[in-house]
Image (cartoon, rainbow, N blue to C red):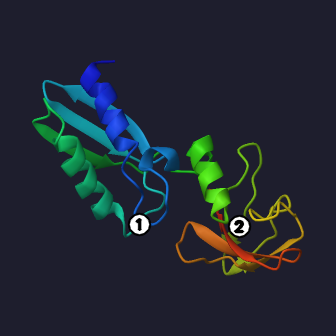
Amino acid sequence: MTALHEQVWRTLEQIPDPELPISIVDLGIVQHVEEADGHVLVTLIPTFVGCPALNVVQDEIRRQVGLLPGVAQVTVLFRYDPPWTPERMSDRGRRTLKQLGVGVPDRSSCIGVRVAAGQTTKPDRPVPCPWCDSTNTELSSAFGPQRCRMVYYCRDCKKPFEQFKSM
């Protein structure tokens, strides 16, 4: 890995997701970085098709990586295969989101709901509350403020919280 390649990764670690208070690296949407002769290619896996923040992320990557010495051109590609899943999030990103009351499915389980033909099924395992860690929670809505999240309610601490959907 070249020094410039490492600088690109460090720069990407400083770019926040426009909708969540974690970096795009911690969110797990940066799949790959290539660098050769001053040309940098960053490949992203968006959290979902049609994410409204993609242009903002793309522009910010081009701007910030383009400021690095030795960078002549920055290209950002979006890939949907393999699809993004919450399992791609870093441990630091998971901790940050939990502190802010946003739940993230455990890597070893499939916590989430399945939505098909207008019907929802219960999650495979109890969904823990990010505020108090209770599993005495209930699904309020399979459709949250973003397509990749749903809304739960904790019966113990009486707080609502968002939960990333398992993909």
- Compared with residue 65, is residue 63 higher up or lower down, i.e. above or below? below
Q: Residue furthest left?
A: 72
Q: Residue at 42%, 39% (x, y): give it.
A: 31
**Residue identifier under label 1:** 51
Q: Is residue 17 left or right of residue 59?
A: right
- Compared with residue 77, is residue 68 higher up or lower down, i.e. above or below? above
How far is disc 1 from disc 2 in space, using C-alphas?
A: 20 Å
> Can residue 96 be seen?
yes
Residue type at tag 2: Arg
Q: Secondary structure at mark 2?
A: loop
Q: Residue at 49%, 62% (x, y): give it.
A: 20
Q: Residue at 38%, 35% (x, y): give it.
A: 32
Q: Nearer the viewer, residue 75 or 132?
A: 132
Q: Is residue 127 left or right of residue 95?
A: right
Q: Secondary structure at mark 1?
A: loop
Asked which quadrant contains residue 70, the reply is top left
**Where residue 167 appears, x then y in whole percent?**
62, 56
Disc 1 packing (10 Å; few <14; some 14–19; many ≥20): few
**Where residue 160 appears, x then y in whole percent?**
72, 78
Contact, mark 1 vs mark 2 (Cβ under 8 Å): no
**Residue identifier under label 2:** 114
Q: Is residue 8 left or right of residue 155?
A: left
**Where residue 52 appears, x then y in whole percent?**
37, 70
